[in-house]
Image (cartoon, grey):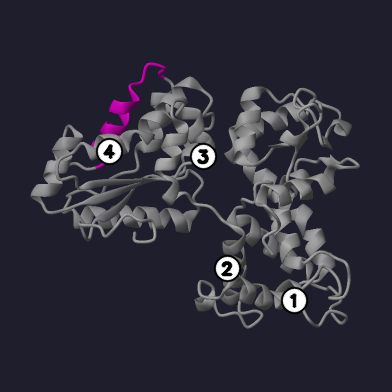
C-alpha cells in the first residue's frame, strides 16, 4: 500500500472474496476460488457457503436490454451473503455490528462480456466501474472492491472524462516494463533451477546486473559477442512487446516454454556461453505468436471480429504496413485494437494510405508478412516511442 501511495489501511483482517471470476479456470484454480468463498463464509460466520450464481444471472441480465445494472451489481453483491440485507448500507451495517470487513474481487470480465461495444454490455461495465463511488458513500465503510479490467473495456464504457478516470487509478495499473521483463525472466530461471539464478534476488538486482546474469540464459548477442547481431535481451523484449513497449508476462513464459522445447536435440557444442541458442530463440517466436493469437481471439471480441473479416480476404492482403479500409478495419474496431496494442498507427505518415503496423508478437500468428519497409519500420517505431531502446 505504501508503494501505491495509499497509506496504511485502517481496517485489518478483512476477508478477500471472489465475487466474479474467469469462466476458463482449470480445476486447481477453481478450487482456490471455491476455497476462498468457503473461508469467507467461515470467517463471516455464515450458515451457508456462498454459491457461484453470478454467471447465470449475468447471462439472463444481458438478454434484457432494459436491465438496471446499478441494481444488478448491488443485488449480486447482497445475494452472495445471506445475512438478511437488502441494500449495500444494510450489508455494511451488518459488517460493522459483527466487526467484519470484506474485499470483493472481480476478474474475468472478458469471459462474461465478450462484446464491450454492445450498448447493454457497455452499461453493465460502466455500472460496475462506478460501484466504488457508491461504496465510498457508505458511512464507516467495511466493503472494498478490487476489479481487474482491461483498458479497452474502460474506454468503451466510460465515454466522458475517461482520461480523468484512468488517471485516478493510474497507481494501480498493471504494466510490465522493460525492467520488470528482465526481473521476471531471471525469476523464472531461478524457479527452473537454471543459470544459477536465485529467485530471491529477482527484485534486488539492478538492470545491469540482471542483463549480465541473463547472458547465461540467451547470450549477450544473437550471435557471437563480436558479431553485429542484436543484443539478445533487446531482441527478445522487442519481439514480445507491442509498439509502445508494453508486454504481457505470459508471453515471456510461453516464449521460454517453446524455446526450451526446441532445445531438445539441438547441437550446443559451439555455444557453451548460453542455455538457449540464437537459432532456437528466433524459431520460437512464430510458435509463441501462434499461441498468443489463438488465445487472444478467444479473449478479445474486437480481434475475433477482425480475424473473421480477414479470413474473407485473399492471403496476399495481409501485408505490413497496411491501410485500415483495405483490411476492413472500422473506426470502432481500430480504436479497440489500437488501445490493446494489436494495431499501431504510424502518425508520422498521416498522408500515407498504408500506415498501420502489427508488433512481431501478433504478426506471425495473424499470418501477416512484412513488406520491404515493414519490419525495419516496426523497430524504428518501437525505438521512437520508448525514446530509445531500454538496454
Q: Secondary structure at mark 4?
A: helix
Choose mark 1 or mark 2, whichever is in front. 2
Disc 2 to disc 4, how far (Cα)? 38 Å
Q: Is residue 254 visible?
A: yes
Image position, residue 235 (x, y; %): 76, 61
- Of all residues shown, which one is farthest toward the left? 97
Disc 1 to disc 2, how far (Cα)? 18 Å
Lower sequence index among marks 3 and 4: 4
Residue at the image position 43 percent from the left and 21 percent from the top: 63
Vertical order, 354 against 244 (above or below): above
Lower sequence index among marks 1 and 2: 2
Choose mark 1 or mark 3, whichever is in front. 3
Lower sequence index among marks 2 and 4: 4
Q: Which residue is mark 1?
A: 275
- Of all residues shown, which one is farthest toward the right? 372
Query: Alpha-carbon neighbours of circle 4 within 10 Å: few (<14), some, or many (≥20)?
Result: some
Q: Which residue is mark 3?
A: 151
Q: Secondary structure at mark 3?
A: helix
Q: Which residue is mark 4?
A: 77
Disc 1 to disc 3, how far (Cα)? 37 Å
Lower sequence index among marks 1 and 4: 4
Disc 2 to disc 3, how far (Cα)? 24 Å
Q: Which residue is mark 2?
A: 183
Choose mark 3 or mark 4, whichever is in front. 3
Disc 1 to disc 4, how far (Cα)? 50 Å
Q: Are the residues tagged 1 and 3 within 8 Å (C-beta)?
A: no
Report which quarter residue 338 is drawn in. Answer: top right
Amino acid at each position: 500500500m505504501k508503494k501505491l501511495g495509499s497509506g496504511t489501511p485502517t481496517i485489518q483482517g478483512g476477508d478477500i472474496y471472489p465475487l466474479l471470476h474467469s469462466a476458463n479456470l482449470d480445476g486447481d484454480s477453481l478450487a482456490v476460488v471455491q476455497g476462498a468463498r468457503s473461508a469467507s463464509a467461515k470467517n463471516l460466520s455464515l450458515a451457508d457457503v456462498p454459491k457461484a450464481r453470478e454467471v447465470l444471472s449475468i447471462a439472463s441480465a444481458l438478454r434484457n436490454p432494459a436491465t438496471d445494472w446499478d441494481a444488478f451489481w448491488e443485488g449480486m453483491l447482497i445475494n452472495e451473503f445471506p445475512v438478511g440485507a437488502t441494500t449495500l448500507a444494510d450489508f455494511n451495517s451488518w459488517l460493522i455490528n459483527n466487526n467484519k470487513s470484506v474485499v470483493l474481487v472481480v476478474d474475468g470480465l472478458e469471459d462474461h462480456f465478450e462484446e464491450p461495444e454492445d450498448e447493454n454490455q457497455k452499461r453493465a461495465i460502466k455500472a460496475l466501474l462506478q460501484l466504488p463511488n457508491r461504496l465510498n458513500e457508505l458511512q464507516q465503510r467495511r466493503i472494498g472492491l478490487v476489479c481487474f479490467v482491461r483498458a479497452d473495456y474502460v474506454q468503451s464504457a466510460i465515454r466522458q472524462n475517461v482520461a480523468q478516470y484512468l488517471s485516478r487509478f493510474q497507481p494501480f495499473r498493471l504494466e510490465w516494463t522493460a525492467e520488470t521483463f528482465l526481473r521476471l525472466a531471471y525469476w523464472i530461471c531461478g524457479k527452473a533451477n537454471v543459470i544459477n539464478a536465485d529467485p530471491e534476488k529477482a527484485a534486488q538486482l539492478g538492470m545491469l546486473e540482471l542483463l549480465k546474469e541473463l547472458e547465461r540464459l540467451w547470450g549477450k548477442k544473437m550471435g557471437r559477442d563480436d558479431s553485429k547481431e542484436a543484443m539478445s535481451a533487446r531482441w527478445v523484449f522487442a519481439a514480445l512487446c507491442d509498439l509502445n513497449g508494453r508486454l504481457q508476462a505470459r508471453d515471456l513464459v510461453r516464449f521460454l516454454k517453446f524455446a526450451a522445447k526446441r532445445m531438445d536435440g539441438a547441437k550446443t557444442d559451439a555455444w557453451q556461453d548460453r542455455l538457449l541458442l540464437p537459432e532456437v530463440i528466433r524459431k520460437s517466436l512464430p510458435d509463441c505468436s501462434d499461441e498468443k493469437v489463438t488465445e487472444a481471439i478467444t479473449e478479445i471480441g474486437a480481434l475475433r471480429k477482425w480475424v473473421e473479416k480477414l479470413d474473407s480476404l485473399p492471403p496476399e492482403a495481409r501485408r505490413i504496413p497496411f491501410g485500415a479500409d483495405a483490411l476492413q478495419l472500422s473506426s470502432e474496431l481500430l480504436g479497440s485494437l489500437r488501445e490493446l496494442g494489436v494495431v499501431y498507427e504510424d502518425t508520422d505518415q498521416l498522408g500515407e494510405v498504408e500506415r498501420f503496423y502489427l508488433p512481431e508478437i501478433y504478426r506471425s500468428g495473424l499470418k501477416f508478412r512484412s513488406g520491404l519497409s515493414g519490419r525495419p519500420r516496426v523497430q524504428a517505431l518501437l525505438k521512437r516511442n520508448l525514446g530509445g531502446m531500454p538496454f
